[in-house]
Amino acid sequence: MGKVKSIKDLVHGYIQLEYEYWNIIDTAEFQRLKWIEQISFRALYPSARHDRFIHSIGTFHLGKLAFEGFINNAIITLGEDFNMYYTQEELLNLKSSFLSACLLHDVGHAPFSHTYEDLFNYKDKIRNDKCKLNKLLFSELKSNKLVSEKEVEQFINDYKYIIVSESSKTCKPPSAHEVVSSILVLKNSEKFFSSFSNKPDLILIIRAILGCVYAINPNVDNNDRVIRCGIKNCMIRLLNSKTVDVDKLDYIVRDSKMSGYENTQVDNIRLLKSLTVVSVDDVLFPAFKKSALSVLDNVIKAKNAQAKWIISHPIVQYEAYLMLKCILVAAHEYIHKNSEKSEFNTSDELIEALFSIESLSEEGKRIDHEIYRLLSDMDIIAFIKNCYGNNIIEEFFNRSKRYKPVWKSHEEFVFLFGKDFAKSVADFFIPIISNNELTEMSKSIIVDEGTFYKINREDYYGAQEVEKVLNVLKRVSEENSIQFSYIFIPVKSNFSTKIDADTTYIQFKDDKDSYTKYSNILNSLSNEAEPQNKYEYVFFYLYSKEKVDKYEFANQLKRHIKENSIYRP
Amino acid sequence: MCRRISAEYIIGNVLIEALERKKSFVDFDVIIKVDDFLYKELLEKYDTFSKVDFEDIYSTVDNYPYFFKAKGNRLELAVSQDEGELEGLKERLLRYFRIGLPKCVVEAIHKSSEMVFNMV
């Protein structure tokens, strides 16, 4: 056994890291993750200061437990088949490749994580294999010496399938940060893996980060490929899939623990020890033994509770809106102030340069007279601060200037308007909520005096409908003597988890063919994987510039809607 | 800053176009093809872009379960084939997905949908 270092993590306790992984962690690209906020809960839970750095190490730790649990049970379940196809040396290689992927899966995250993720690929679509990020991924693969031509060709075919995988219930298309992470791993592969005596399987690492499984056809492929690629696909799914994976398991527990939000307990050790393998139509899939059913149930409860009570909280939603708005406004202000000396003509060009692969690297990206390197939250904050003076930006830094939500949950919305009338209120505001002229990238809608001028034109479909709704809101503002200045943020109807019960398998006996889909047995459990609380209408938060008496405000709104509603669902 | 039309508006409008052709469903591929045509048209002419992915179709189904359901590779309207009900639904779809869209965008969606519907 080589040198091992251990670090103490508040979530998992002591995490053992073998020497070769330290080399990855010490690189500037990985250290950058210390300045990438894990998730924007801080507006609601100030202690949620955890970052992508510790989440990546936590995922690595759970990856180790998952690998051990899976292999131990797979050997029992597959018996001879397993030992025939995987030698001890190959198994070690499989392990180091999987763990490297766990460690590096988020290395390409944008500052402020998912809030800015879309800016990597602003106008492009990942499903288009010729989009900028995909072209870069393919070219990095083709030029990498650790990957063979055949592997690249096979990967590109499989990747093209998953990016348009509408027919596949078993894989999900990659997101922008996963493609960026893969590009960074390829660009830095020599540096990252220089300490490994046995070079890890680079293509497996890339596939695991992207969730890009090997295409297997048991009717055509030989047994060797079916088992070898089948096991590799299990590794890919253990890190990135539509079902429970180590990435999700780490953030579900970490986000709640670090925020201080009391959530359902998840016994990760019991769950990961129960990992095994089953054969679904002769294709291998990871599965959980029946002993883990109670934990699985808790994972889904915890994930749903987090989605409903934290991610969908009006303060968290507002923070995300402001963050996105701020960078767009700051880019615009920058171009405006530097129009004569900047090499960029539009804010779009500037955003593209700022959120580029180069700006994540040590070498960096020159933006006029400055070099942006290892781009992190701090760079973005500094960039935004330079445009202080703009209302939106001041609002971001000065909390007293922020708009305030009139209601703070769907339950309160129903209480204020009554169960029978809540739907009519939501439907009444639809012309504003769905108005594309008023929405921005984040789907937030700003409504004030200027809105009348924006929509009062002949070239908008149903502009008079929008105007009617605006008039009601204006009258209510006047009656309450508050400023006619509001922001609407629609909330997703579905709080349910992304854990797909159809592709989560439960094994009842130590036999690869003895399994059932989790969805088949959900009725006897809590049925939490099936969303119970989908709205029957588009639910939204309404934020007012001034503090309002919510009961008075709701009553007046109700009265006006009753008088003005031309549409009764 | 270039404008973006949300995926769900494109999806909702393609369903409206289908309803106008007396169809209560659309294949995922059709939506994606319409979006591909639309993307070019909107970006070139109006500095606006659309971005529909398969995940967007699933999330639209999740967000509007009272309008849509997904069956295999097909997006279906969550109503019976009763003509009166379909008419009422169309009115709601128009309110939810068309009001507030620039008329030029509605026209571009119509043009792209027509091309794709004629192809299949």
Image: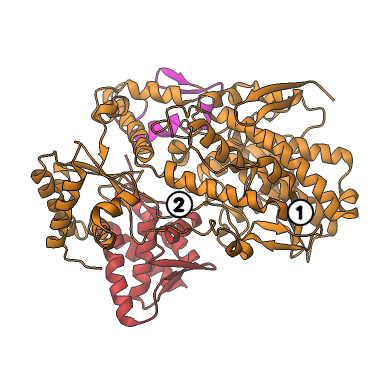
Q: Residue tagged by mark 2?
A: A495
Label 2: chain letter: A
Q: Is residue A2 above or below residue A93?
A: above
> Which x, y percent locates residue A407?
28, 45
Given the current orientation, which residue lies at the most extreme top position?
A369
Residue type highlighted by circle 2 = Phe
Q: Label 2: few (<14), some or many (≥20) within 10 Å? A: many
- Quarter of the rendering occupied by the N terminus of chain B: top left
The first of marks 1 and 2 along the sequence is 1
Q: Nearer the viewer, residue A459 or A443?
A: A443
Q: Which residue is mark 1?
A: A277
Q: Is residue A294 visible?
A: yes
Q: Which residues are magenta?
A: A344-372
Left/right placement of residue A71 relative to residue A23 reads right
Q: Secondary structure at mark 2?
A: loop
Q: Amino acid at mark 1?
A: Val
Q: How is the image coloured?
A: by chain
Residue A384 picture location, percent across and down: 35, 25
The question of residue B28 being in magenta is answered with: no
Question: Is residue A194 visible in this depiction of the protein?
Answer: no
Give yes or no for residue A360 being in the magenta stretch. Answer: yes
Chain with red colouring: B
SS assignment at label 1: strand
Q: Colour of chain A?
A: orange
